[in-house]
Image: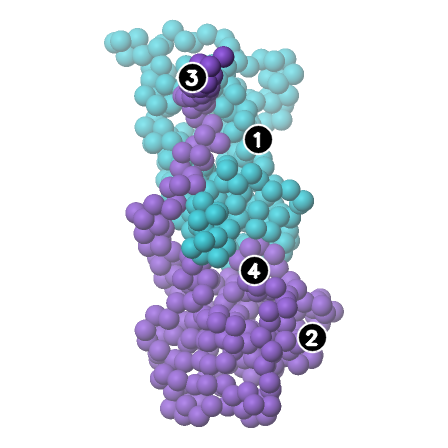
Amino acid sequence: MSALAESKGVLRRDAVRTIERRAFLKQGLSLGALTLLTGCDVTDQDSVQTALNAVSRWNDRVQAALFTNRLVPTYPESAAVKNFRYNAYYGEDAVPKIDGATFKLGLSGLIDNRRPWTLPELYALPQASQVTRHVCVEGWSMIGKWTGVPFRTFLERIGADLTAKYVGFECADGYYSSIDMASALHPQTLLTFKISDEILAPKYGYPLKLRIPTKLGFKNPKWITAMYVTNRFPGGFWEDRGYNWFAGI
Amino acid sequence: MTSDEHGYMKVHPGVVRVTHWINVVAMAIMIGSGWRIWNSSPIFDFSFPVAITLGGDPATSQDVHNELGLAGALQWHFAGMWLLAVNGLIYFIYGIWSGHFRRSLFPVGPAAFIRDALTFRLPHRLGVYNAVQKTLYLGVLVVGVVMVLTGLAIWKPGQFQELAFLFGGFDTARLIHFLGMSAIVLFLFVHIALVVIVPKTLPAMITGRAPAHTELQETAA
C-alpha cells in the first residue's frame, strides 16, 4: 500500500470514528459528554474565567455577610495530631530557615506604631491556646494545637486601624495572603508561636504563623516577616491564582 | 389527562421541563468539578480521569497558576451551587405549591414498590409514574437535598457547625457528600438507559406533550 492510500485509510478510519462520536453525542445526553462539552477548554476562555471570577467575588461578599464572631468547634487536647502534616507548594527541603535572634516582624500601613517587633517582645504578649480543625482547600483536614497571642490583642497593641478593611501578610518564602478585618478580630484568630506545645519547627512556619480557624488552610500564612493594614484589596498567592479570597469555613 | 384537538396531551408542566434541563447543566458542572476536587485529596484510593472532570486544562493551570486545576474546579463548583440551589428551590416550591409532587410522586410506599417491582408491573403513561419510578424520583430528590446540606456542612463547618455535627462531623459529611454523588450518578445511568430504551420520553421532556395514543403498557423512564 502506498503512503497516500495508507493515509487515506487512516483518514477514513478517523471519519468513521468521528461519525461514531457524533452518534454517541447525539443519542446520549450523557453526563460524560456534557462534561466534555462544558469542560476543560471552556474554563480557560477569558470570558468564562471573567464570569467565574465575578461569582467568586460575589461569594466573598456572601461569606462576609454570613460571618459572625461565633467560635468554631474546639476539641480535647487528645484529639490534636502531634506530627502535623507539612504543607507548602514546595518540598520540605526548601523551607525558609529564619534566625530567631535577628528576626523582626515588620509593620506597615494603617498602624499607629510601626516599630518592628523582635521575638522576645512578641513572646512577652499574653498568650492563648486552641485545639481546632485545620481544613485544607483540597478537602483533607487535621486537628492540631496552636499557641500564640490573640491577633486582636496584637492589633490593638500596635494601634492598628480596626476600621480598615484588610490585614495583609508577607512571608519569607515569597508567599503572601490577606484577610478581612472582621475575621482578623475573631477571638480564635492567633498570631502563633507554637504547635503541639513546642516552638514552631521550621517546617511549620518558624517563627510566626497566623492561625485562623475560621478560614481554609491557605489563609494561615507561615514564616510571616511583615504585616500591614490597608483599605486596598491585597489579594494573595493562591487567591491571585483562582482560589476564593474570603475562604471562610 | 385530556388530549387536545391534535391528539396530544400535556405530560410535563413547563416549570418541570425548564428546571429539569437547567438541572442537567447544574449536574454536569457540580459532578464534573466535584470529581476534580476529589482528585486533589481522595478519600478512597482512586482518582477520576482528568478528561471527564471540569476545571480547565491542568497543564495550562500548572504553567499559569502553579497548581493542577483545583482552583478552576472550585470556581465551577461554587458557581454551579447557585444554579443548582436556585433552580432546585424553584422546582421544590413549584412541586409543593402546584400539587405536582402530590399528584405525580405520591402515594408511594414499600407495599406498592414491592408489588410493582416483583410482579414487574411497570406500566405507565408518559408523566404518570409507577411505584418503582416514584420511589426512584423521590429517592434522588432526597439525595439532592442531602447533597446540598452536606455541601453546606463541608463548605462551612464553622458557621454551620450544627449541620456538620448532624452529618457526623466534617470528615463524615464529606464522605456522605461523595456517596450522595455516587447515588446520583447511579440514578443517572438508569435514568438515561431507560430514555435510550424508550426514546419518546425525551421529546416529551422537551415539548411537554406526547401523542395521546401512547397510553400503552410498557417499561419506561
Q: Distance between the residues labelled 4 and 2?
A: 19 Å
Q: Residues within 10 Å of mark 1 (few under 14, many from 20)?
A: few
What chain is colored cyan?
A: B
Callout 2: 10 Å neighbours few (<14), some, many (20+)? some
Check whether the beta carbons of the residues at disc 4 and disc 2 lie within 8 A of each other. no
Measure the C-alpha gap from mark 2 to mark 1. 44 Å
Q: Is residue B112 left or right of residue A14?
A: right
Task: Report which colour depicts chain A.
Answer: purple
Please rate how many residues cluster around mark 4, counting C-alpha atoms within 10 Å: few if below 14, some from 14 to 19, many from 20: some
Which residue appears at 61% of the width and 45% of the height?
B176
CB contact under 8 Å: marks 2 and 3: no
Residue at disc 3, secondary structure: helix
* Visible residue check, residue B33: yes
Residue type at numbered disc 1: Leu
Q: SS class of the residue under badge 2? A: loop
Q: What residue type is labelled 4?
A: Cys
Residue named by callout 1:
B186
Vertical arrangement, residue B112 with respect to residue A190, above or below:
above
Task: Mark 1 and mark 4 in contact? Answer it, CB < 8 Å.
Answer: no
Quadrant location of the N terminus of chain B in the rendered image = top left
Labels 2 and 3: the sequence-earlier one: 3
- Residue A196 numbered mark, or none: 2
Q: Which chain carries label 2?
A: A
